[in-house]
Amino acid sequence: MLFSLIIPVYNRPDEVDELLDSLSKSDYNEKFEIVIVEDGSSLKCEDVVNKYQDKLDISYYFKENSGPGDSRNYGMKKAKGDYFIIFDSDCIIPDSYLTEVDKALKLDYVDCFGGPDKALDSFSDIQKAINFAMTSFLTTGGIRGGSEKIGKFQPRSFNMGLSREAFIASNGFGNIHPGEDPDLSIRLWNLGFETRLFSNAYVYHKRRIDWDKFSVQVNKFGKARPILNSWYPEYNKLTFFFPSFFIIGFAIAVLLLILTYDLLLKLYFVYFLVLFLVSTYQNKSVKIGYLSVIAVWKQFYGYGIGFMESYIKIIIQKQKPEIAFPELFFKK
């Protein structure tokens, strides 16, 4: 089986350098190809790609900007492989990654898989705190961090595998972003394909974001979810509402404090204290523990507010998603 690694990139040559360097150290003994899709960047990575031409089988394509989903589709159409593996440009790949994927597919083949993400010691403290917020069982249920306690796993496109057969049948990613990966997973299920988590196929995901960019990102995640719920109501879950309930509950707790009822606010304090202690232990840093509390608050607040705004516009007011939130859709 020939693996084709599909990597869309937009103005991130330094990240591509790190990613390709990590892939050049792979312990996988079979041939694999890499397809770099430059999505209309003004800061191109072509010179970086040329550095690795004698170490890796790389194809480089430049196209007009149309978003990551469309760029992944473009790369898969150009690729020669039987199975596509999709990375974000801000990932660093462990030496054993492809070997683990190959082993898992041979043991129990599946047409679409996803893998978890971890943080390297070299990542910044904020990156480690954001990684904790996005992967901890205390926040997301551990789905991004490798938990398998879910009925159907929805692979995330920063670390995702897709067979050529599944790509052809589904036409790949849609034009919503973010939200293109759960959209594809659900369409694959409806077509009869299965998805699965490969716990050992993890990547180091840098998350190239500061606090402001993180807040914008999770807010978009929140806005995208009611849109997906309106498209696929059969896959709606109560857990999607939790960040909004969390924010509303916190506001109620503050109001109750004015009436000298402090029990609810104490429960929030206990939750954040547990977050602090767990992150401090896992990261062996009090500072990262503190930053993790900030990251989780920003995560819940940004997602919760975005979800509520989108729920009102999409579910209650029945607005068209492309009109209500044009920033979530790339024009093809």
Image: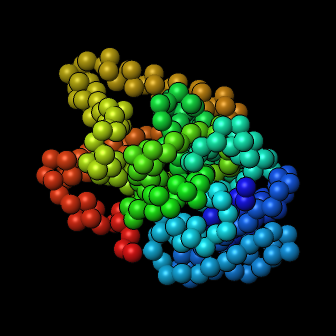
State how many labels appear: 0
User: Who's the residue at 75% across and 50% down the image?
Assistant: 98
Quarter-of-image position of residue 38: bottom right
Work out which quarter of the rendered image holds the C terminus and state it. Answer: bottom left
User: Who's the residue at 56% across and 70% down the image?
Assistant: 77
Q: Position of residue 17 (x, y in %)?
A: 74, 68
Q: Is residue 126 visible?
A: no
Q: Is residue 262 left or right of residue 60?
A: left
- Seen from the viewer's position, the closer of residues 50 and 128 is 50
Q: Is residue 94 above or below residue 175?
A: above
Q: Is residue 27 above or below residue 65?
A: above
Taking the view exactly as shown, the residue that stands out farthest to the left is 317
Q: Is residue 202 above or below residue 237?
A: below
Quarter-of-image position of residue 100: top right
Q: Position of residue 91 (x, y in %)?
A: 66, 56
User: Who's the residue at 49% across and 30% down the image?
Assistant: 150
Q: Is residue 196 visible?
A: yes
Work out which quarter of the rendered image holds the N terminus and state it. Answer: bottom right
